[in-house]
Image (cartoon, helix red, strand yellow):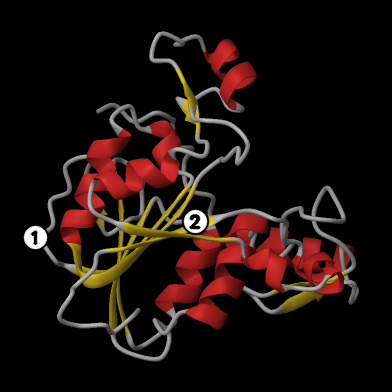
């Protein structure tokens, strides 16, 4: 499988530091709070409601996942083996700072990850991880069911894969392998390197490889002021469990 996007060279640590200091000064304030880097700002980059964090570059999907994990997961409270595929820097930094986590990053060809491997043909042994994070990756992959099957294989019994994708909760998945023109893909699927927009049948796809799936709309548990303060919206997190009938411990 070819990489569906090109990776830009790594931005130098010096540039990142200078940019962070500048943006933190420019957006100084108390109106919004990033739950990942735990800093306050006057607004998000580019927009007030759900833009990018001026400090850690988190987006609304990252902040939503972080809030959900803090409330509903025990991965930060016990030893846990984590696989993070195509990791975003903001969450990567959060996980790497936890001493209880055995944290592995992976991607097909991105620089700076621990392991280069194809999500449709992972090099890891069966039952290698207690949790998998896969955010906005599956929409890039032609054989997404193979990727789902591989995540199921490398999860330990009762392990959970946390999956986020571009999602239309009112329609079925829109995909067409004959659409190869980048302009047409962006018009139809939202981005030039997307192969589909997932819909209501995604749960069935995930269940077809063995997962027990819960659709979590965590933003609905927050009041309006908290949604605005954290810059999150009513997005879905698919929590996909590899059940072990003999053990009911959750991650």
Label drawn at residue 230: none
Provide residue 26's location: percent of width, then percent of height: 88, 62
Would you identify the image quadrant in which residue 34 lies? bottom right
Residue drawn 18% across the image and 73% down it = 244
User: Which element is circle 2 on?
Assistant: loop
User: Which element is circle 1 on?
Assistant: loop
Residue drawn 34% across the image and 41% down it = 205
Residue drawn 43% across the image and 85% down it = 76
Would you identify the image quadrant in which residue 7 lies? top left
Residue drawn 50% across the image and 74% down it = 94
Up/down of 215 relative to 144, above or below: below
5 or 207: nearer the viewer: 207
Residue on which disc 2 sits: 88
Marks 2 and 1, the one that precedes in the sequence? 2
In screen coordinates, is 87 left or right of 54?
left
Residue on which disc 1 sits: 125
In screen coordinates, is 25 left or right of 35?
right
Taking the image as drawn, is residue 131 in sight? Answer: no
Question: What residue occupies the far left of the structure in this picture?
Answer: 125
Taking the image as drawn, is residue 86 in sight? Answer: yes
The CA distance from mark 2 to mark 1 is 24 Å
Assign the N terminus to one quadrant of the image: top left
Provide residue 116's location: percent of width, then percent of height: 23, 48
In screen coordinates, is 27 left or right of 85?
right
């Amino acid at each position: 499988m070819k990489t569906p996007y090109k990776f830009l060279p790594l931005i130098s640590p010096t540039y990142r530091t200078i940019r962070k200091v500048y943006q933190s000064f420019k957006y100084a304030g108390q109106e919004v709070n990033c739950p990942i880097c735990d800093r306050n700002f006057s607004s998000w980059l580019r927009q007030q409601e759900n833009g990018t964090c001026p400090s850690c570059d988190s987006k609304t999907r990252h902040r939503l996942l972080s809030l959900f994990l803090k409330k509903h997961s025990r991965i930060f409270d016990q030893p846990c083996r984590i696989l993070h595929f195509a990791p975003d820097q903001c969450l990567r930094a959060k996980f790497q700072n936890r001493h209880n986590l055995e944290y592995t990053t992976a991607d097909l060809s991105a620089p700076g990850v621990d392991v280069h491997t194809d999500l449709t043909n992972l090099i890891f042994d069966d039952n290698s991880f207690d949790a998998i994070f896969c955010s906005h990756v599956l929409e890039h992959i032609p054989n997404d069911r193979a990727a789902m099957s591989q995540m199921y294989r490398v999860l330990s019994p009762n392990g959970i894969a946390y999956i986020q994708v571009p999602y239309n909760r009112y329609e079925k998945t829109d995909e067409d392998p004959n659409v190869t023109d980048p302009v047409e893909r962006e018009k139809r699927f939202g981005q030039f390197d997307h192969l589909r927009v997932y819909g209501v049948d995604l749960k069935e796809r995930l269940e077809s490889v063995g997962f027990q799936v819960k659709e979590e709309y965590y933003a609905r548990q927050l009041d309006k002021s908290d949604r605005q303060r954290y810059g999150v919206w009513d997005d879905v997190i698919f929590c996909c469990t590899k059940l072990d009938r003999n053990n009911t411990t959750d991650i």
